[in-house]
Image (spheres, coloured by chain):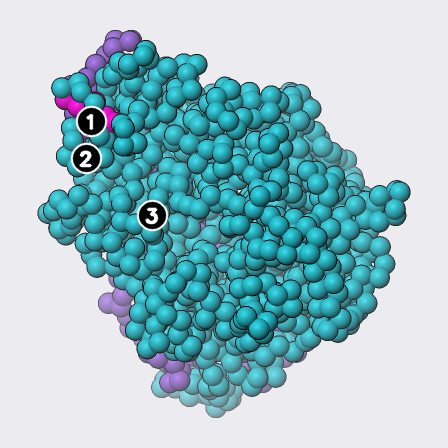
Amino acid sequence: MTDLPASPPGRKQLGLVIDLDICVGCHACATACKEWNSGGHMAPLTDFHPYGGDPQGVWFNRIHSFEEGDGEGARTVHFPRSCLHCAEPACVTVCPTGASYKRAEDGIVLVNEAICIGCKLCSWACPYGAREFDADVGVMKKCTLCIDRIYNDNLAVEERLPACVMVCPTHARHFGDLGDPNSAVSEMVARRGGLDLMPELGYRPVNKYLPPRLDRMAPAPGPAEPPAAPDPAEGNRLLRWIDRLLSR
Amino acid sequence: MTFGERWRDYWSPREVIDTSPKVSDEVKYTTCYMCACRCGIKVHLKNGGIRYIEGNPNHPVNRGVICGKGASGIMQQQSPAKLQKPLLRVGERGAGEFREIEWDEAIDTAIAWLSRIRDDDPRKLAFFTGRDQSQSLTGFWATQFGTPNFAAHGGFCSVNMAAAGMYTLGSSFWEFGEPDWERTRLFLMFGVAEDHDSNPIKTALSGLRSRGAKFVSINPVRTGYSAIADEWIGIRPGTDGLFVLSLIHELLRADKVDLDYLGHYTNAAWLVIQSPGAANDGLFLRGADGNPLVLDGNGALASALEPGAAARIVGEAMLEGGGRAVPVFQLIAERYLDPAYAPEAVAATCGVPAETIRRLAAEIAETAFAHEIEVPVPWVDWAGRRHETMRGRPVSVHAMRGISAHSNGFQTCRALHLLQILLGTIDVPGGWRYKSPHPKPCPPGPRPAGRADQVAAGRPLGGAPLGYPMGPEDLIVDADGNPQRIDKAFSWDAPLAAHGLMHLLIRNAWAADPYPIDTLFMYMANMAWNSAMNTAETIRMLTDKDPATGEYKIPRIIYSDAYYSEMVGYSDLILPDTTYLERWDCISLLDRPIGGVDGPADSIRQPVIAVDRDVRPFQDVLIDLAVRLRLPAFVTTDGSPRFPGGYKDYIALHERRPGVGPLAGWRGEAGADHGRGAPNPRQLQRYVENGCFWKYELPPEQRYYKHANKAYLEGAVSMGLIDNAEPIVLQLYVEPLQRFRLAAQGHGPVRPPPASAARIEAYFDPLPFWYEPFEGARIDPHEFPLHAITQRPMQMYHSWHSQNAWLRQILGRNRLFVGRAVGRRLGLQDDDWVWVSSHAGRIPAQVKLMDGVNPDTVWTWNAIGKRAGAWNLAADAPEFTKGFLLNHLITDLLPEGGPPAANADPVTGQAAWYDLRVRLEKAPDADAGAGKPHLPALRHPPSFAALPEVLRYGAPRR
């Protein structure tokens, strides 16, 4: 068992806010994550049978596309899934070696590869499927929130963001301190009714999902008919324009 | 730190994390080529390899973002399918038996074949390119060689949109215009649009939703962008034209058209002669000076081009000698007010409820006319009149492949433009805006070259092989009306084939129709697989031999590609190309530049990593061949190379017209000129210093109404974008179409052969109309009740990315997506196998049921299925054990049931991929591979390395 750091209110909790209203499922965040992290803190993100019958690799961020609802009310949802950096992460408390840990200073959940024994208890404990076992080295890997970007003095300040946030063409991904109720991301969550994933499980995910603005999916109220212009009798339809002059 | 934290640190020492690793040793800017969008990228290099590719934040196309493909460029560079060395076929075509040869031998072989052709009859070379971004070079090379048989792949991709747009408004959907994303309030997107301009569109859609503009997607399938639409209209494939004309019906009925705009900027008031049977029927009534005429307020004829002239839109001019003439608008109103276009009349055909059409028309009217925009920027129109504001109507449209890939695509696209123009939304605030270098005259010049008198042994062609015919006299036909190009572009089969007809190339070359060719020379065009209609038949033609001589019917095939695509296996001489990260390139204003709505722009690629195999950039090879063939523009008077540095020198030094070259930025010897200017030997360096792109921002007063904006038009002339500053009048009524129709009625010196006359007369309607797509009209709808189409996945570009280790993990096989109602009827569940049958054959496919699809439509992802052995994938790769290719069911010719004709649009010849009709049958225990068209695995060329079992990219650099 690994202990969690104390988590007093207001303590920094870095995380992501993902806007399901504008995600088109393009996979840019998934491949940018793979690309950055292939040379990053947990590198490599090994790929097995990359050109074979069942190519399987380590990905910290995957997109699931599915339909929700039935018939007329159905919609297509693109759902990016990565570590939620829970406030109460079962993947940490279940770890027998302390390899899986939550950082006190910013809430990021990481795996210390040096002491991970690859027992996979954490992946069983995580209900979100966010852990990725690298069988090549026998170590569990996961989203680091790009810890080697967000504090990186070699990057310009505006680039100190997780790769998935930097890249998103629809700007559906946001990064910030969700422990601070006044941060831009917290305000966005409050304004848009941001949701926890499976809150009933009690892990208190830090990452939030902004739901689709479903009110806008209904047809906009408008006049049922084109605005009034009397429809002249058959054969006389052109009369209304008979005296109209156009100017060039 | 709390006590607990200190305790934990004591027992489990904290990991030491380097939070500031050095990202890269060097950053190089270039242009992405993982698809056609041409985003700017920053390539981070570290320890001699690529560490990371990201978007260039300053680049006008992507503004720093990058897509799923672009961020996987590393794996494209790692592809095990990269060709290694020139290859010469030693076995039979399709066997994959090659001998590796040196470049000297490769070039000598090509020269031996090509010089003989050029000295004899240049037409015997057919040079066609696929997703090529160097068409300003490849087209110029063909012209210099002297063959009319040149085109890129637009004939099977976009030409319906290009031609409809160019003849109507001097620009087109696809890449040459876009909605006014910042100001539009109602955006209608028709058809698949996910593989061009994809990052700009994604970013813009997000902006629309964030600021509350409405986004309506009209698409048989609800995936991708449609998933975030405010409203999805799951229309029946191929009926968009009827749907749009019904919207026009409703708008006309309610008098919700912008008459002021029509008067100033369109040919709405021009008089059209109504004299059935006469040689001038349907042409504009013209004055002695040739200018079109209008009916003024007093009922007298007046020049249509006079500024300020008042003109009737309904009325009648009686002509001397009989007949009459009426304004274009009157013809439009008469036609589309007909009850045949009423929502109730079209609803069943379109699969869209009448109330939806009526409501959408009402929303369009409300948005356009109750929410007019005025941007407080004064501007001066073409006639010198000052306007205090720029007024606009915030309704916009975008359309792509879902419109163009039907046999009614040209007229459907015309219908869309008619809707846009009637609403007054072309290049106005909130509407649809021209992207530089457009607008151009409708249509732009020049006319195509290639008639017999323009072809001569050993000489360049008498003009560019592609262009825009204005009438029958511009066709490339002989005196009997027979085609003169190998693809039959610009013949009576496809008069406005402005992009050529690559999809007919192989059949015609095989059949020696209209004449035999000697050598087929192609570049990155996968004609032996996903770029061909009826793939198995195409392969048969590529491998068919003349029994008398034992020679292949297509005698020689030269092919250039960077990867082991299916086409490589069917070629005789392979000239291996580099990847996009290994070469110079230009995204030229002479071709398809990256210009935007606020001004022109172009860009380059530079090599960011060294070539590690014996391959050469195709453009360098092409210039090398040109020098050896002594093509005049590529050699100096003493025969030495004009561009000794190859393509790099050509980009900077070539002049197409005085002062106009491939790149518009930093011209002139000092690099101070833009647009026109002397060649600048340091031009590429200036591009590199600027992140590999150039852009010019138009001043605010030139950003709208470009077709009639004096300052814009004059500026565009001085930049070399257009030839004169005449206003560009939007063509609601397209007179050149009527000229073809008159010829079909027996008028004029150039007339269609009798077999073509009825077809020309029917489809060359100068006002848009809808007709049922040809395949659907010929097959028995009970036998083939379903439409079958493809969609473009956002993480894959055509066939390119199955070799990409990351992207194929996301989409390594495709399924057939079937509506739940059809699934219930056939007793299908997810993962069941079905036989998909068309009139041409059947293939097995594995099913996935879904709600978001038109109930009479099935679909799959494009080009995921692969030929076994191609792309150097392992023998058990799902791309061929389970994936499938719909192309096997699509034919290049129409099914029986009418005169023989191409499965194509009758106006432009565009391939009608999306007209496919199928039926499904549940296949109990179908063996995934057994029922496929039987094609053995392609063998690999020599020197392909063994495939890695484990890829640990990045590990050594930790």
Work out whether mark 1 precedes mark 3 in sequence or the reverse, and give the earlier one: 1
The total number of labels drawn is 3
Q: Are marks 3 and 2 in contact (CB under 8 Å)?
A: no
Q: Nearer the viewer, residue B610 or B292?
A: B292
Which residue is tagged 1? B302
Kindly indicate which chain is depicted in cyan in the rendered structure.
Answer: B
Q: CA distance from mark 1 to mark 2?
A: 8 Å
On the image, which quarter does residue B839 sit in?
A: top right
Tell me the amino acid under the disc marked 3.
Answer: Pro
The colour of chain A is: purple
Work out whether mark 3 precedes mark 2 in sequence or the reverse, and give the earlier one: 2
Q: Which residues are magenta?
A: B292-297
Q: Are marks 1 and 2 in contact (CB under 8 Å)?
A: yes
Q: CA distance from mark 3 to mark 2?
A: 21 Å
On the image, which quarter does residue B600 sit in?
A: bottom left
- Is B298 drawn above or below residue B862 in the view shown? above
Q: Which chain does tag 2 point to?
A: B
Comparing labels 1 and 3, the label whose residue is closer to the camera: 1
Q: Give residue B592's position: percent from left, percent from top.
A: 45, 55
Q: CA distance from mark 1 to mark 3?
A: 27 Å
